[in-house]
Image (cartoon, rainbow, N blue to C red):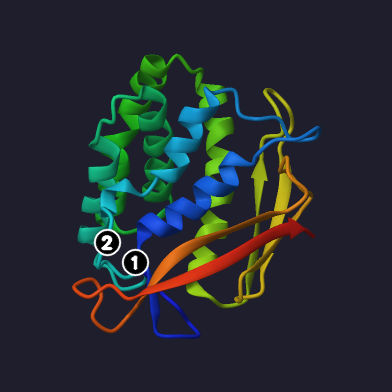
C-alpha cells in the first residue's frame, strides 16, 4: 500500500491498479493505436497488474523487505485467472519489475519468470513483439498511478509503442500531488480523463476502513 506524503491516508495496491486500468481503458487515438492484444483483456490485465498484493494489503511501498516483495510478485505471476491475455499482461509487468530490481530475491524471481513468458504469450495467441509493445503501455499507466498515490509532485516519461512495428514515442507525465495529471503527447481517446479511487484513513487501516474518496483528472500537457 501507498502512504500519502501530504495527509494521513493510505491507498491499497488494488486502488493504485484501478487508476492504472482506468488510463489503459481510455488508451488510443489517431497517433497512438491500441495494443495488438484483445483490448478488454488487456485493460483487465493492467487493472490486475499488482494482484499478488490482494485487495487490502499492508505491504507499504518503500518498506517491504526484498524477500517479501519477491514473494508478492511471484504470487501475481503464478496466479491464473482463466483469461490467458490477462495473465500475460500481469506476467510481463512483474517480470519487468523484478528484472529491474538489483536485490538477490528480485533477480532470483526474474530468473524463474523469464523462461515462462514465451509459453504464456503462445497460450494467449500473442506474438512476443506485440506483447512487449503492450507492456510499454502497462508501464506508463503503472508509473502514473504509482506516483499519484504518493500524493506529491512528480514526473517522468516512458517510451511507448504507438503501433505495431512503429518506433517508440516518449510520453511524459507530470503530477501536482493534488489530483491533476498531464500527459505529453496525448495518447488517450478522450479530451480529458476524470475519475476517482479510494484511499483510507491510515489510522486503523486495514482493520477499520474509513474511506477517503480521491479524485483525479488527466489532461493533455
The x, y position of residue 143, in whole percent, is 54, 57
Q: Residue at x 28, y 84 (%)?
A: 203
Q: Disc 2 vs disc 1: Cβ atoms closer than 8 Å?
A: yes
Q: Nearer the viewer, residue 55 or 49?
A: 55
What's the mark number on residue 1?
1
Report which quarter residue 189 is drawn in.
Answer: top right
Instruction: State the residue in front, 83 or 158.
Output: 83
Quadrant holding the C terminus: bottom right
Q: Which residue is mark 2?
A: 56
Q: In the figure, 145 relative to 110: above or below?
A: below
Q: Is residue 66 left or right of residue 93?
A: left
CA separation in Å, label 2 and label 1: 8 Å
Q: Is residue 77 above or below residue 20?
A: above
Q: Quadrant of residue 173?
A: bottom right
Measured from the top left, where is residue 177 in percent x and y?
60, 76
Under tag 1, what secondary structure? loop
Task: Bin the neighbour count of mark 1 within 10 Å (Cα to Cα): few under 14, some 14-19, many 20 and up.
Answer: many
Residue visible at 41% across and 49% down in the picture: 97
Q: Upstream in the sequence, badge 2 or badge 1?
A: 1
Instruction: Report the side of 216 relative to 55 (left or right).
Output: right
Classify mark 2: residues with Cα within 10 Å, few (<14), some (14-19) or many (20+): some
Amino acid at each position: 500500500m501507498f502512504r500519502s506524503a501530504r495527509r494521513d491516508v493510505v491507498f491499497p495496491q488494488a486502488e493504485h491498479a484501478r487508476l492504472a486500468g482506468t488510463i489503459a481503458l481510455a488508451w488510443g487515438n489517431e497517433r497512438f493505436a491500441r495494443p495488438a492484444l484483445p483490448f478488454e483483456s488487456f485493460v483487465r490485465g493492467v487493472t490486475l497488474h499488482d494482484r499478488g498484493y490482494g485487495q487490502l494489503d499492508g505491504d507499504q511501498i518503500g518498506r517491504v523487505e526484498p524477500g517479501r516483495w519477491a514473494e508478492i510478485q511471484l504470487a501475481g505471476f503464478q496466479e491464473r485467472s482463466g483469461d490467458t491475455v490477462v495473465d500475460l499482461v500481469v506476467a510481463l509487468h512483474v517480470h519487468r519489475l523484478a528484472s529491474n530490481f538489483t536485490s538477490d530475491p528480485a533477480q532470483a524471481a526474474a530468473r524463474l519468470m523469464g523462461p515462462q513468458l514465451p509459453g504464456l504469450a503462445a497460450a494467449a495467441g500473442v506474438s512476443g513483439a506485440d506483447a512487449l509493445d503492450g507492456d510499454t503501455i502497462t508501464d506508463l499507466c503503472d508509473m502514473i498511478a504509482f506516483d499519484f498515490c504518493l500524493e506529491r509532485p512528480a514526473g517522468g516519461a516512458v517510451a511507448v509503442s504507438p503501433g505495431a512495428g512503429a518506433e517508440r514515442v516518449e510520453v511524459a507525465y507530470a503530477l501536482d500531488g493534488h489530483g491533476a495529471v498531464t500527459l505529453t503527447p496525448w495518447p488517450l481517446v478522450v479530451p480529458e480523463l476524470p475519475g476517482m479511487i479510494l484511499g483510507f484513513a491510515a489510522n486503523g487501516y486495514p482493520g477499520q476502513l474509513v474511506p477517503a474518496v480521491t479524485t483525479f483528472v488527466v489532461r493533455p500537457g
